[in-house]
Image: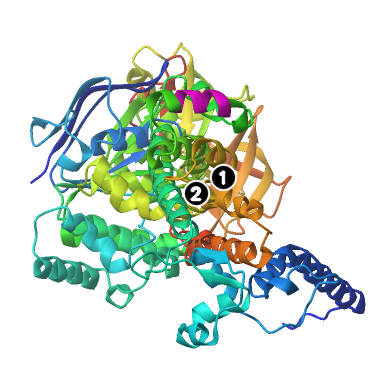
Amino acid sequence: MAAVRTSSEIGFNRVAIVAVLLVTIIFLAPIYWIASTAFKPRNLATTIPPTVVFQPEISPFVKLFAKRSQMRNPASPEEYAAAPWWERVVFDGGEKIVRDGKGQVQWSGYPSRFLNSLIVAITSTVLAVGMGTFTAYGFSRFKVKGEADLLFFILSTRMLPPVVVAIPMFLMYRAVGLNDSHVGLIILYTAFNLSFSVWLMKGFMDEIPKEYEEAALVDGYTRMEAFFKIVLPEAATGIAATAVFCFITAWNEYAFALIMTSRRAQTAPPFIPSQVGSGLPDWSVIAAGTFLFLLPVAIFTFLLRNHLLRGMSFGAIRK
Amino acid sequence: MTQIELRGVQKFFGAVQVIKDLNLKINDNEFIVLLGQSGCGKTTTLRAVAGLETIDEGDILIDGKPIQHLKAADRDIAMVFQSFSLYPHMSVYENIAFPLRATRKSKAEIDSEVRSVAKTLQITELLDKKPSALSGGDMQRVAIGRALVRRPKAMLMDEPIGALDAKLREEMRAEIKRLHIKQGSTTIYVTHDQIEAMSLADRIVIMHEGVLQQVGSPDEVYSRPANLFVAQFVGSPVMNVADAAVAETASAVSVTVGGAAAGFEFPRALLSKLNGHAGGQLALGIRPEGVLIRHDAAAGFLPVETQIVEPLGSFDIVDLKVGSKMLRARTKSGFVGGPGEKVFARIDPAQAHFFDTASGKSLEVRL
């Protein structure tokens, strides 16, 4: 049956579409700003009013990854002709790439920081979600003495801003030699995310009817097998959502990374702004670093988007 | 060959006792229906047999061996849940194959057994579908297939068709019965629907507040209810129950209900069969079909007035006012014109039941 829409409904729809577009633009504007700045030559990055139309350049990314120094004099024509294309774009900006005695290009600090971010965020996410899933299953399926108190206690770790404990944590970490180490940051981020993960997963676990496991138990499986074969696939949606949130928290964490790490285990968030202070700030390079930093979360979320949409597991049980 | 026996089973949920000293012996190939209102302990009993619920006292024996300490997985029992509980992330094929994968069977064996069960249940064309794409009836067929495929010692069914709509329920009821006749396995079936129980069961076990009330064939529990609860729980429309006073008259015995001016006539043999209870607190139970009515006066018929007429298609249910009490009678459809009509009624002594009001127990009077 074709529904007939009144003109006021059509009008409302149009207003709604405009509103949605406006909100989308507001949300996407900073991303556009970062992305466009990342491809601007250095001199166009800070113009007022901002340059909107420009010839995109790859040079900020080359500069981001390579160690470079200012040149007093421009490169000689021979030097320029001998250089590969990615070195020429650096020459164009009045800088040169630093090479060691054997002529090997020296990497900047960015790639290792980026790698540190990946190691710390992925490991702590896996740990927090893994432990959270098991804990939530326990709380959801078994009679736990003082369940409500325990769950409150778990949540209470999030009742103060984490930075409050930064100084004591720093002193403790220094005492046990965990500062500036991957393990130290991983423990810290896992601890932050665990309470969140337990609570979120508890909600998802409660929603999985326990008849599924009971059916598996009667079908000849142990509880552990039932957990892995039935509960875990059913909880995939919840696990994906929890993982995305935990990953974002660990990936973006700034304050502790700044205090607890300096070089070896430093993650990208404290590193990127630290580049502002070295010489004249090259905003294009900083934007390029930020732009690349956004990608893993975007890719991670994109890959899990099907799991984030609910509804996959519905309809197989009659209530 | 599977016999299941429950001996002195007790189960508590906190301070609440949900199963009280349950003793029951289920024979090989028998279709037993646990019937009762919700909260009567029937599902808990079933889950205890399945191993999903522990018991606090007593023994559950399968073929003479106590199994109450075994895990569900080790009891070799299959269960069909009211919610069907098909694994949503698996196809129908995988769902049916799942119990077999717990055993050490080869892929080829599993495949042939899944296909054979699917053929029996006529769901072969559904094997590749996901449960969410199935209709309620098909989901139930798959759930039954998953239970059958392992050839378990016993099948447990917890209101397996309770979630279906009325028409489908009738179809599935017949299908379950046909399947049981064909496959023959010891089955315990839980339901609150007495029609389901009557139509499926070899024997019905009626429970109330954790206590077993009566075990018997559908005919036994219908025509010889052991107590007032069973009498009023089994049968639709419900049996009429009224406090009765028995008095001896010159020629026979008169049974007065609801303080009416005159009593219904019963044979003299009633007195001896009541066995001394005649003067005590008695209740008369009579099913609507045991209340006979006619338009003209006759010996033994009392004049009564009709109050409500419920036409139910193949028959009518007529409410008759007898003293302060309402008796429901079953008549041919259209027999009574409407409310307020004067008719004559009597009670068929052969269909009458007498209960001791205090204990609720049947006095086993058969006339």
Residue highlighted by disc 1: A253
Of mark 1 and mark 2, the one earlier in the sequence is 1
- Can residue B345 be seen in this snapshot? yes
Query: Magenta span has B175?
Result: no
- Can residue B234 be seen in this snapshot? no
Instruction: Identify which residue is drawn at 52% across, 84% down.
Output: A80
Taken as a whole, is the magenta stretch helix, strand or loop? helix
Residue highlighted by disc 2: A267
Real-space CA distance between mark 1 and mark 2, rounded to the nearest whole angstrom: 9 Å
Q: Locate residue A11 relative to residue A73 in the image: left or right.
A: right
Which of the 4 image quadrants contains residue A6?
bottom right
Disc ID at residue A313:
none
Residue type (three-letter) at the residue carrying disc 2: Thr
Question: Callout 1: helix, strand or loop?
Answer: loop
The nearer-to-camera label among 1 and 2 is: 2
The magenta stretch spans which residues?
Answer: A166-173
In percent of width and height, residue B250 lies at 47, 20
Look at the picture and state if B328 lies above or below A115: above
Most foreground residue, A203 or A51: A51
